[in-house]
Image (cartoon, helix red, strand yellow):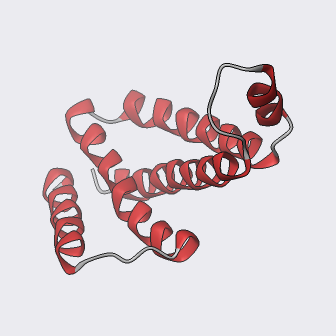
């Protein structure tokens, strides 16, 4: 099962990158609405396109992971994206992360370690 870890980390990084690009894209767009203006702005937004590419790559890797590894082991590994999301929040969005959130992240990492063991 230890072969799953680098794959799960890669898939989680792709997911996190997709979410970061999606947030950047949405920050540049007008308020959400079902209008031609909103959807047109989305279609010419390169960050939105990059988000889609990364989501697609993460999905392809996920397909491989769940084909090869037991679902009960693979699925909890998706939670690693929460760990990378915390780092992305600090790095890209300059958010403050409390000590309790870091404790929660450490439990996620510990749990993933126990699952693949």
Residue 27 place in picture, x, y as percent: 65, 52
Q: Foreground residue, 104 or 54?
A: 104
Give the farthest residue toward the right: 44
Q: Please tell me which residue is depicted at 62% across the width and 40% down the height of the picture.
A: 57
Q: Please tell me which residue is depicted at 24% across the width and 44% down the height of the picture.
A: 76
Q: Please tell me which residue is depicted at 20% across the width and 34% down the height of the picture.
A: 72
Residue 40 place in picture, x, y as percent: 83, 28
Residue 51 place in picture, x, y as percent: 66, 44
9 vs 101: above or below = above
25 vs 108: above or below = above
- Write down the quadrant of residue 32 in the picture: top right
- Write down the quadrant of residue 102 in the picture: bottom left
Residue 87 place in picture, x, y as percent: 44, 71
Q: Foreground residue, 35 or 77?
A: 35
Side of 22 where 117 appears, left or right: left
37 vs 78: above or below = above
Total numbered circles: 0
Q: Please tell me which residue is depicted at 32% across the width and 36% down the height of the picture.
A: 69
Q: Quadrant of the C terminus?
A: bottom left
């Amino acid at each position: 099962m230890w072969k799953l870890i680098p794959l799960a980390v890669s898939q989680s990084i792709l997911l996190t990158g997709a979410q970061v690009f999606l947030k950047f894209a949405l920050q540049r767009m007008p308020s959400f609405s079902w209008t031609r203006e909103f959807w047109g702005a989305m279609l010419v937004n390169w960050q939105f396109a990059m988000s889609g590419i990364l989501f697609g790559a993460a999905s392809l890797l996920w397909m491989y992971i769940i084909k090869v590894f037991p679902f009960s082991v693979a699925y909890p590994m998706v939670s690693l994206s929460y760990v990378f999301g915390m780092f992305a929040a600090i790095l890209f969005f300059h958010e403050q992360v409390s000590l309790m959130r870091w404790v929660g992240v450490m439990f996620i990492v510990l749990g993933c370690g126990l699952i693949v063991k």
